[in-house]
Image: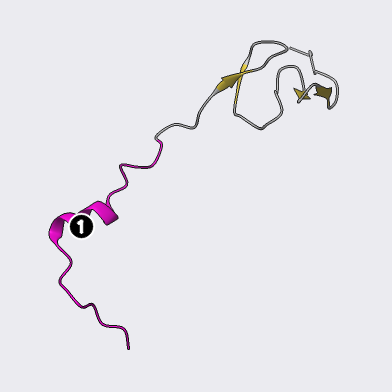
Amino acid sequence: MAVPKRKVSKARRDKRRSNVWKLAVPGIVTCPKCGAFRLPHRMCKSCMTYNGREFGQVNEAN
């Protein structure tokens, strides 16, 4: 059975348990075609494009 050889210090233990390293907000980029804000590696909802390709029609009912 695995047993720790030495006591884990409070600083090392708390450093491991902290969640400071996580990003609070995902990175937001602008669409190269229309300039709207979108998440990276996802289709733009305003112009329905990703990586230079179109994936449907924009619904302009409003």
Front-most of residues 19 and 5: 5
Crowdedness near tag 1: few (<14), some (14–19) or many (≥20) residues, C-alpha within 10 Å:
few
Magenta segment boundaries in residue numbering: 1-23
Which residue: 79% across, 21% down? 52
- Name which residue type carries label 1: Arg
Is residue 11 highlighted in magenta?
Answer: yes
Up/down of 19 relative to 41, above or below: below
Most common secondary structure along the magenta stretch: loop
- Which residue is at the front of the view, 42 or 9? 9
The residue sitting at 23% across, 77% down in the picture is 4
Left/right of residue 18 with respect to residue 27 in the rendered view: left
In the image: residue 8, left or right of residue 50: left
Q: Quadrant of the N terminus?
A: bottom left
Q: Is residue 38 left or right of residue 23?
A: right
Location of residue 50 (image quadrant): top right
36 in the magenta segment: no
Q: Nearer the viewer, residue 39 or 2?
A: 2
Name the image quarter holding residue 23: top left
Q: Quadrant of the C terminus?
A: top right
Query: Which residue reaches farthest bottom?
Result: 1
Q: Is residue 7 left or right of residue 62?
A: left
Above or below, 22 against 33 in this view is: below
Q: Residue at x 20, y 78 (%)?
A: 5
Residue 58 position, x and y percent, is: 80, 18
Give the image location of residue 36, x and y in percent.
Answer: 63, 14
Residue 8 placement (x, y as % from top left):
18, 66
* Label 1: which secondary element: helix
Q: Which residue is mark 1?
A: 12
